[in-house]
Amino acid sequence: MDKFILYSCYFSPNADLNTFESQLSELRENILSRHKEAIVCGDFNAKSPEWGMSYEDRRGEITTSWMAEMRLVVLNEGREPTFVRGASTSIIDITLATESISNECSLWTVRQDETLSLHRYITFEVFRRAPAPTPEHLYTGWSLKLLNKGQFGASLQQIQGESISTADDLIEELTIVCNRAMPRRRCTNRKNPVYWWSQEIAQLRRECLKARRAYTKRNLQAHVREIRRTYKMSCNASRDSDSLIQDYYECSSQENLSRNCFKHPKVRENWRMVLAAFTLLVIGVGLLATGTITLSEPNSRLQGSVFLLAGFICFLPGAYHVVYIYLAAKGKRGYHFHNLPLFT
């Protein structure tokens, strides 16, 4: 392994996207600082069709962009899941390699051996051969997207006019400046350029990928909205189930109405509270009547006031609960048993 570096990494699914991008940037700086070929094996917790998933999430989009910037090649083959949790499977373990070493990697396989983990073993082979000289014509220029403008301007200012006497000298100096300011873009034997590719096709591909991501995101948002709507409807149905179906309680006679209200499941389940409400109502009515009669006597006004006060204290909560229970059992809109804290 003196010719390449093997990286093993893990990116937590609980980290936010900013942390994820920061960790990828740290890995990028480490790889570039070693000046060697690299193989990156890790649990990225990202999903993308690039390594076998049927869809791409936000992490997958960030990872594919990072791979393109680093010019890394995906070694994953097929759609065999690398992570299995019961009936849920996914491909979140990725093997990447720089362009040169990727040509020497083969037999990438997801093994079925028992791992005592939710992740499966992944194996592949690397054969190191003597490096063949790279023909100069394979270099097709520089990657302008990665141009360091500050470095480019500083390198141009360092060119000495006296050292340039011919066109070849100028080309050599400009080549040195470009090498300092941006990485070289080259073609490899693994993926040769095709004659029909053009900037127009590249732009159409970018628009297609952008539309696919927007479509996936929109469908995901619609799916989440549907789940939330179903959840709210279930909660409301659960809360309103104590009133059953409103039409079921619409009776033509007072006798049937009273019988149906008293047969309501919530009323029968909390019959003690219903009985207490009716008891308070009856006691309150009795005390109010007694207080009214007592006030009519000339020498009993104080006693009458006491009866009236006690009657109001019993009558108000009793009447409120009796009326509320009646309307909730009737299925009146806005009246629900869950609003009564003493009801279970």
Image (spheres, grey):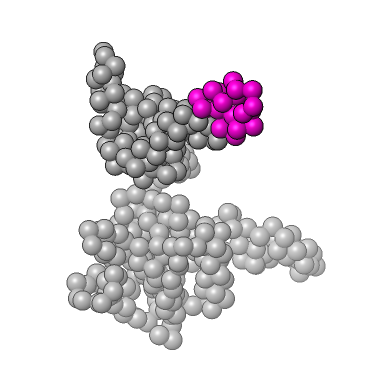
| In the depicted structure, whether residue 214 falls above or below residue 170 | above
Is residue 303 inside the magenta stretch? yes
Q: x and y percent of residue 46 in the render? A: 40, 59
Instruction: Name the residue furthest front.
Output: 299
Q: Is residue 40 left or right of residue 142?
A: left
- Toward the viewer: 28 or 180? 28
| Residue 226 horizontal side relative to residue 115, left or right | right
Q: Position of residue 237 (x, y in %)?
A: 33, 35
Q: Which residues are magenta?
A: 288-308
Residue placed most toward the observer, 330 or 149: 330
Give the residue furthest to the top: 252
The C terminus sits in image quarter: top left
At horizontal 41% and vertical 51% (from top left) the residue drawn is: 57
Residue 165 highlighted magenta (yes or no): no
Question: Quarter-wise, where is residue 166 in the image?
Answer: bottom right
Which residue is pictured at 41% across the width and 65% down the height? Answer: 44
Task: Assign the N terminus to one quadrant of the image.
Answer: bottom left
The image quarter containing residue 157 is bottom right
Judge by depth and name the residue closer to the eye, 229 or 66. 229
